[in-house]
Amino acid sequence: MPEDIVDSFYRDLVQPLGNLVILFAQAEASLVDLLIALDGRIDQRAAQRILKADDAKQKVLALAQTSGLVDYELTELLNGIDQYWADRESRNRFIHDEWFVALRDGGIPTTRGLPLRKGSSVIWDSPTSGEVWNLASRFLEHHGLFSHVAYRVRRDREFDAG
């Protein structure tokens, strides 16, 4: 089996993009678990439906407000959710935009994102492997934050009940 099957222009991006795919999936799974913990009455399917809603970010932020966390911990969670959505948009660009090689610019990998809204302009990017690694690392941080908060919410709920 070949080591890489993409053109040599993309080889520096293969490993960071692979890490991004896996770490995003883990962060999203921990966010689903967080929603289940925060609501206390929903299952995995209902949590996934929340994340697919047009106003998903607002729904998640509203649930976070009811988490019982206060002060720094609540601020950290709210900021983490906000950053997750910004990082998710960057991830979506890397995953869903068209990749090609800009030969006139020395053969650098480039992306072109077509706008979803009429009147919006095309989104161009030339991501470096370092940028993709940094984004992947942030999803590892999101996973850790969401997992920790879900644990805390469940632990506090058990303590209050018992």
Image: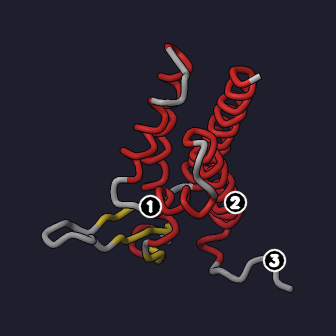
What's the coloring here?
secondary structure
Within 10 Å of disc 2 (Cα), the crowding (few <14, some 14-19, many 20+) is some
Residue 11 numbered tag? none
Q: Which residue is mark 3?
A: 3
Q: Residue furthest bottom?
A: 1
**Residue shown at 48%/53% (left/top)?**
88
Dot in front, 1 or 2: 2
Q: Is residue 95 above or below residue 6?
A: above
Would residue 124 be visible to someone looking at this image?
A: yes
Mark 1–mark 3 Cα distance, whole angstroms, equals 24 Å
Image quadrant for the C terminus? top right
Dot in front, 3 or 2: 2
Residue 22 numbered tag? 2
Horizontal side of 59 relative to 36 (left or right) equals left
Mark 1–mark 2 Cα distance, whole angstroms, equals 22 Å
Q: Residue furthest left?
A: 119
Q: Is residue 92 above or below residue 104?
A: above
Q: Looking at the picture, tell me which residue is in the foreground, 59 or 87.
A: 59
Residue 14 % position (x, y): 67, 67
Residue type at mark 1? Answer: Ser
Query: Which one is earlier in the sequence, the residue at label 3 or at label 2?
Result: 3
Q: Is residue 58 above or below residue 96?
A: above
Q: Residue furthest top?
A: 71
**Residue shown at 48%/39% (left/top)?**
81
Residue 7 % position (x, y): 63, 80
Residue 68 % position (x, y): 54, 23
Residue type at mark 2? Answer: Ile
